[in-house]
Image (spheres, grey):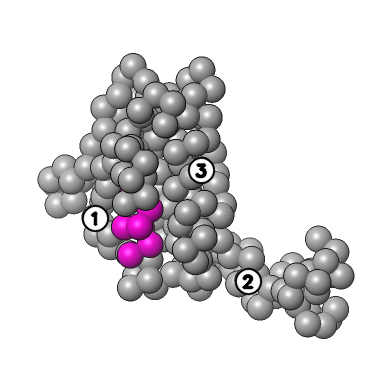
C-alpha cells in the first residue's frame, strides 16, 4: 500500500513511519476481527470432558466459526461478521447458512490475532482483552440467533477441545 494512501486514511502521520513492514501504530490500526469459517458436516466443542456445543448436519452442512476479536473492533465489526457468517455462499451448491437453515458452531479464538512477523513467538498485542472480547462474541451469537440461525458455542476463555468433520475441505478467512 502506498504511503500516501496510508496517510490519507490517518494510519501514519509521517512518511518515515513506513518502513520495511508496518510499524506498531499502523499495524494496530489495521487490526480487524477475524474468523475462520469452515464447512462441516459435524463439529463439537468440549470443556473438561463435557460437550458444551455441537452441530450435526450431514445433509446441509454447517459452519464452524473460529472468531478472534481485535482490540480495535467496534459494533460495526460485529454487525459485519454476523452478516458474513449468515450470508456468505460457502455451503454446497453456493448456498448460505440462511439459505438452507444451516447451524453454526461459534468458538472464540484469540490466537487468530497473533502476529508472527518478528521473532519466534507470536505477539498477541492486537487481541482484545477478555472483558472486551467476551461481550462481542456474545453479541455475534445473539445477532446470528436474531436472524433465526441455530447457534451452538464454546465457553469463552476455557481450554476447549474442538472436533470437526470438514467437508471439501472448504475454509475461508473473513476480516471485518
The residue tagged 1 is 155
> Which span of residues is magenta-colored?
135-141
Q: Could you say where residue 44 lies in the image, as x and y percent from the top left?
A: 26, 38
Q: Examine the image and state in which quarter residue 148 appears.
A: top left
- Pointers 1 and 3 in contact (CB under 8 A)? no
Foreground disc of the pair 2, 3: 3
Q: Which mark is residue 51?
A: none
- Residue 136 falls within the magenta-colored stretch: yes
Q: Name the residue under label 2.
A: 29
Q: Residue 84 carries which label?
A: 3
Name the spot of residue 175 as percent of width and height, x first. 56, 52
Callout 3: 10 Å neighbours few (<14), some, many (20+)?
some
Q: In which quarter of the image is the C terminus?
A: bottom right
Q: Cβ–Cβ below 8 Å for labels 1 and 2? A: no
Query: Is 157 left or right of 132, judged from the image as shown?
Result: left
Determine whether 77 is above or below 83 in the image. Answer: below
Q: Residue at x 51, y 43 (%)?
A: 84
Q: Where is residue 152 in the image (x, y as percent from the top left)?
A: 26, 42
- Which secondary structure, mark 2? helix
Provide the secondary structure element on which disc 3 rests. Answer: helix
Give yes or no for contact between labels 2 and 3 (Cβ–Cβ under 8 Å). Answer: no
Residue, x 23% and y 37% (percent of image)? 54
Q: In which quarter of the image is the N terminus?
A: bottom right
Label 1: which secondary element: loop
Q: How far apart are marks 2 and 3 (CA)?
A: 22 Å
Label 1 packing within 10 angstroms: few (<14), some (14-19), many (20+): some
Amino acid at each position: 500500500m502506498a504511503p500516501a494512501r496510508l496517510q490519507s486514511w490517518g494510519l501514519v502521520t509521517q512518511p518515515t513511519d513506513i518502513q520495511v513492514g508496518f510499524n506498531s501504530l499502523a499495524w494496530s490500526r489495521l487490526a480487524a476481527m477475524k474468523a475462520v469459517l469452515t464447512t462441516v458436516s459435524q463439529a463439537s466443542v468440549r470443556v473438561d470432558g463435557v460437550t458444551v456445543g455441537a452441530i450435526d448436519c450431514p445433509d446441509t452442512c454447517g459452519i464452524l466459526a473460529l472468531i478472534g476479536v481485535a482490540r480495535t473492533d467496534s459494533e460495526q465489526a460485529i454487525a459485519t461478521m454476523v452478516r458474513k457468517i449468515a450470508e456468505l455462499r460457502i455451503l454446497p451448491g453456493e448456498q448460505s447458512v440462511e439459505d438452507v437453515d444451516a447451524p453454526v458452531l461459534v468458538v472464540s479464538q484469540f490466537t487468530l490475532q497473533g502476529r508472527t512477523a518478528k521473532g519466534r513467538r507470536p505477539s498477541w498485542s492486537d487481541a482484545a482483552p477478555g472483558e472486551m472480547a467476551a461481550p462481542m462474541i456474545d453479541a455475534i451469537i445473539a445477532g446470528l440467533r436474531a436472524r433465526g440461525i441455530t447457534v451452538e458455542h464454546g465457553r469463552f476463555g476455557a481450554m476447549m477441545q474442538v472436533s470437526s468433520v470438514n467437508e471439501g475441505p472448504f475454509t475461508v478467512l473473513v476480516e471485518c
